Image: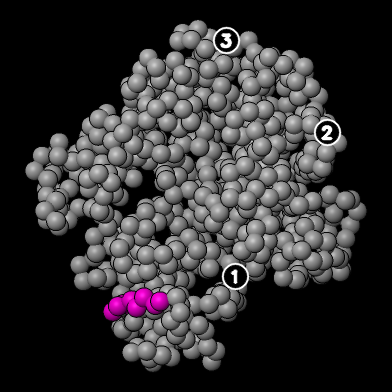
């Protein structure tokens, strides 16, 4: 894990969000009203300046900071804190007009017009210069202001640029990666295929729908380059900030893709982790949708929370969420009464030290005028949304001791952005059924249901601190990762891996011999072929005297030392192993060769957890749809009991607890209404 040297030093859990006073400079009565409403809402922290470049620098070299000075001072006047954003997410029009090199070129080699946001070239010398300059001005002016808590670097970095500057930078990046050896690049990209061997570095171009878009090694390296180029752009933004405000921590807000709520796929966020001090992310789950239960969606939220928390092994920040509805889902349904508080408590339970909103006040115009906000167009503090935000603020004030507390896990899941990219490109298996993240969810779900804490780690993290490591569909695996897995098992760890794992190396080339010898040694098997099933095809696996349905994938296995735990029941591989166990060193490795129904995961992991004596941190008994998550400090456990169902649920407490939110002590049997949450405290 990449822990930060600069700690976030706040006197409270952060509650507030994105504030855009630059949209209201002509309405001083609104800005005055905001300061009053902030206190009524029990909010304390506000992100400012995110898209304010045209207000800060209306003409090149002409600066207007006076309005921001007043905002800083007004927020400070009631004890509030400011998260100051750099404005690089959206350029002023004068810059695009005067310096067209700042505009992006898309993959079809068409130069984009001014407008939108994130429409800038990360390689543009002009944009690098201009962002460094405005950031320096901001750091010089506000670096010592007592309200400054945290730097918010740009906003939701995303996208790529295919201009000539970026093409040149890509070639230089490739030369460095392949030590200037064009033959090594051709080998890595399997150049002879379709006569794609390069004889000059200048022949190399980024993937394009107008040209080459099917060389997987090229596509993979371009996505790696785009991540690195974004990181370098961010590092350029950080130069004056680190120089002038060395003790102020920095963050940049990560995203998740909806409606499936999966980690944002455009960038490898792990490459950012050691450059920033605090992980933050923007969460917009589709609560109350018509395709999954509330508990199922809550599980997906928990997975991303565990991923982003584990990246630095410290609390993260929820930088954006909506207190009501968004304006960009296909259906923008309002949160039902109680859901906002419940969803916020889940974030705190999984490791967030903040609940921050987009946005504080609704815009009057443009694309976000109907996006949810704390302050609606009616400007009232009496409406339902404002009152629920205020109630959450009161509860967060009672949870001040939660700040900086930890979560401990004996179970880890291995997630890899680059693997997701490579598997997405793979033109095999089922083009629509590979579903890397959904497979992660399928294996994560039993742990969430049993309230077992989980870390979601990267391949460069330390595996040794865990008893159990789950590795679903790691299609792309280099030798170093295989060696780390071997060491983990040899030293006593329990490893679970699935079908479609270890197929290609880091260049997206199939391993010689189809599977690494190291994996055969660890698992005691050799995958022979993977059968891809049509949606209506079915098979079954007999495991521990029970039958479980197979769909999508069934890998045919040859035993080389493992023992069979489950056999296929149909097709040409009837009677052959589908689930295996292999003792190796002091540990054991399990291979699940088929995509099996959820009941299998429930039973398989329940048995493994029992054998390994991995338990929930508390012994509370609950009903379906209730999640129990725990954070701790040196003295106490903070136990969040959350009802993610539409029915009342019965809970049996295992001991006497302090009720942090409602006061007093509770024990024995209690009930939770739909969407209700309790936070209980007990001495550690």
Residue for point 22% across, 48% down: 212
Residue for point 54% across, 38% down: 253
Depth check, front residue: 600 or 382: 382
Which quadrant of the structure image shows residue 35? top right
Camera sees residue 301: yes
Instruction: Return the residue found at the far left.
Output: 199
- The circle drawn on residue 64 is 3
The spot of residue 258 in percent (x, y) is 54, 51
Q: Is residue 191 above or below residue 83?
A: below
Q: Is residue 580 above or below residue 91?
A: below
Q: Looking at the image, tell me whether mark 1 or mark 3 is earlier in sequence order.
A: 3
* Colouring of the image: one colour
The spot of residue 264 in percent (x, y) is 48, 48
How many C-alpha atoms fall within 10 Å of the one at disc 3: few (<14), some, or many (≥20)?
some
Q: Is residue 373 above or below residue 100?
A: below
Q: Which residue is mark 2?
A: 381
> Does 151 lie within the magenta span?
no
**Mark 1 or 2: the one toward you:** 2
Count up the numbered dots.
Answer: 3
- The circle drawn on residue 540 is none
- The circle drawn on residue 446 is 1
**Mark 2 or 3: the one toward you:** 2
Q: Is residue 617 above or below residue 217?
A: below
For this view, does 65 lie left or right of residue 577? right
For this view, does 490 lie left or right of residue 3? left
| Segment tinted magenta in the rendering | 527-534
């Amino acid at each position: 894990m990449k822990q930060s040297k600069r700690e976030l030093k706040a006197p409270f859990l952060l509650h507030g969000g994105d504030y855009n006073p630059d949209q209201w400079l002509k309405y001083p009565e609104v800005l005055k009203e905001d300061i009053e409403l902030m206190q009524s809402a029990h909010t304390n922290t506000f992100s400012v300046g995110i898209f304010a470049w045209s207000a800060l620098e209306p003409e090149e070299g002409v600066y207007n900071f006076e309005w921001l000075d007043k905002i800083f001072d007004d927020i400070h006047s009631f004890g509030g804190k400011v998260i100051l954003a750099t404005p690089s997410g959206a350029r002023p029009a004068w810059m695009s007009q005067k310096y067209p090199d700042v505009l992006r070129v898309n993959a079809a080699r068409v130069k984009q017009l001014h407008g939108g946001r994130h429409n800038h070239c990360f390689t543009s010398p002009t944009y690098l210069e201009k962002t460094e300059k405005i950031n320096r001005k901001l750091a010089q002016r506000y670096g010592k202001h007592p309200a400054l808590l945290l730097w918010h670097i740009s906003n939701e970095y995303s996208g790529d640029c295919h201009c000539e500057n970026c093409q040149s930078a890509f070639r230089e990046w490739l030369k460095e990666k392949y030590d200037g050896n064009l033959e090594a690049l051709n080998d890595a990209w399997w150049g002879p295929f379709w006569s794609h061997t390069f004889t000059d570095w200048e022949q190399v171009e980024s993937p394009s729908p107008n040209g080459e878009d099917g060389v997987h090694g090229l596509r993979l390296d371009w996505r790696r380059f785009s991540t690195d180029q974004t990181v370098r752009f961010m590092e350029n933004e950080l130069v004056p900030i680190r120089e002038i405000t060395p003790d102020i921590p920095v963050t940049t807000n990560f995203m998740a893709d909806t409606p499936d709520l999966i980690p944002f796929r455009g960038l490898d966020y792990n490459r950012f982790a050691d450059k920033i001090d605090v992980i933050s992310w923007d969460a917009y789950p589709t609560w109350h949708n018509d395709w999954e239960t509330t508990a199922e969606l809550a599980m997906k939220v928990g997975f991303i929370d565990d991923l982003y928390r584990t990246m630095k092994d410290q609390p993260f920040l929820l930088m954006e969420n909506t207190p009501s509805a968004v304006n960009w889902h296909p259906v923008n349904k309002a949160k039902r009464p109680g859901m906002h508080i419940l969803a916020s408590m889940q974030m705190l339970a999984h490791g967030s030290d903040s609940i921050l909103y987009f946005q504080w006040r609704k815009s009057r115009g443009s694309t976000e005028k109907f996006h949810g906000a704390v302050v609606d167009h009616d400007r009232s503090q009496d409406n339902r949304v404002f009152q629920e935000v205020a109630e959450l603020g009161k509860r967060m004030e009672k949870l001040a001791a939660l700040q900086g507390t930890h979560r401990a896990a004996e179970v880890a899941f291995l997630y890899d952005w680059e693997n997701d990219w490579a598997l997405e490109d793979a033109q095999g298996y089922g083009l629509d059924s590979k579903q890397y993240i959904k497979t992660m969810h399928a294996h994560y779900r039993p742990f969430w249901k049993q309230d077992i804490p989980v870390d979601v780690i990267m391949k460069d993290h330390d595996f040794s601190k865990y008893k159990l490591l789950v590795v679903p569909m790691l299609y792309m695996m280099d030798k170093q990762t295989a060696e780390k897995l071997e060491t983990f098992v040899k030293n006593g760890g329990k490893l679970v891996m699935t079908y479609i794992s270890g197929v290609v190396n880091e260049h997206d080339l199939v391993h010689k011999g189809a599977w690494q010898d190291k994996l055969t040694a660890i698992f005691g098997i050799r995958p022979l072929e993977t059968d891809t099933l049509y949606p209506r095809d079915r098979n079954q696996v007999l495991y521990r005297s029970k039958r479980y349905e197979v769909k999508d994938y069934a890998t045919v296995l040859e035993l080389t030392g493992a023992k069979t735990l489950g056999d296929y029941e149909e097709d040409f591989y009837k009677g052959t192993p589908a689930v295996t166990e292999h003792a190796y060193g002091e540990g054991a490795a399990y291979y699940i060769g088929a995509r099996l129904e959820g009941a299998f995961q429930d039973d398989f992991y329940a048995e493994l957890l029992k054998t390994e004596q991995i338990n929930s941190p508390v012994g509370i008994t609950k009903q379906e749809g209730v999640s129990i998550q725990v954070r701790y400090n040196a003295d106490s456990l903070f136990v969040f009991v959350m009802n993610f169902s539409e029915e009342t649920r019965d809970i049996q407490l295992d001991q006497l607890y302090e009720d942090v939110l409602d006061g007093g002590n509770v024990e024995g049997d209690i009930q939770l209404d739909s969407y209700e949450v309790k936070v209980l405290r007990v001495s550690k």
